[in-house]
Image (cartoon, rainbow, N blue to C red):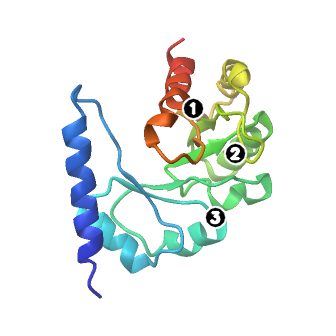
Amino acid sequence: MDFSEIENNVKRLKDEISAGNAYGEAVTLVAATKTQSAEAINAAIRAGVDAVAENKVQEFREKFEAVHGCPQHFIGHLQTNKVKYVVGRAGLIHSVDSLHLAEAIEKECEKKDVHANILVEVNVAGEDSKFGIKPEETESLIRQIAKLPRVHVRGLMTIAPFVEKPEENRPIFHKLHKLLVD
């Protein structure tokens, strides 16, 4: 198969990231792999993505063994009954939005004698169709999760609304960043 389009897209994105990164901050290019074959995902890895991410537990399970060469993340809504399929495999779980879920991750970490890195999902835009905690609940949830010895909060994440002009979402990400630094 010819994966030159994937390679070209990854190179273009890496160039755009480098050009727009005036402060030298570390940027991780995470490729969402939804509906993509293991061959296409491995082509993206060879082209230079820093991590790959899946949003459905079943696809994550199917692809985990066939994907090689970079960290694998889980980016979808995670139900507590499916934690066992992700813990110990995902280098980062992007979508923790409750203490109940964090405790389920902790319990599975204990069983497998591993640790889990997570991002707390914050619904900054307040959209009913999105998961995540309210911004004002963020500090309290992080403090509660910090008491779990095997679950490590590595940051925050949000899913911004779909808009025609990406600049319209800058305030959403600014509010998320402000939660992190305040």
Mark 1 belongs to which amino acid?
Val
Residue 87 visible: yes
Q: Is the residue marked by circle 1 packed among few (<14), some (14-19), or many (20+) residues within 10 Å?
A: some
- Work out how far the residue at label 1 is from the one at label 2, CA to CA, in angstroms: 12 Å
Q: Nearer the viewer, mark 1 or mark 2?
A: 1
Residue 174 on image: x %, y %: 49, 24
Residue type highlighted by circle 2: Ile
The answer to whether residue 29 is left or right of residue 136 is: left
Give the Cα separation between the discs numbered 3 and 1: 21 Å
Q: Mark 2 sits on what residue?
A: 105
Q: Which residue is mark 1?
A: 153
In the image, 97 versus 90, the foreground residue is: 97
Secondary structure under tag 3 reads loop
Residue 81 in the image: above or below residue 133: below
**Percent from the top left, x then y, of residue 36?**
47, 75
Position above or below: 38 against 97: below
Return the mark for residue 56: 3
The disc, 3 or 1, on the residue closer to the chain's N-terminal end is: 3
Q: From this viewpoint, is residue 154 visible? A: no
- Foreground label between 3 and 2: 3
Residue drawn at point x = 38 percent, y = 79 percent: 39
Quadrant of the image containing the C terminus: top right
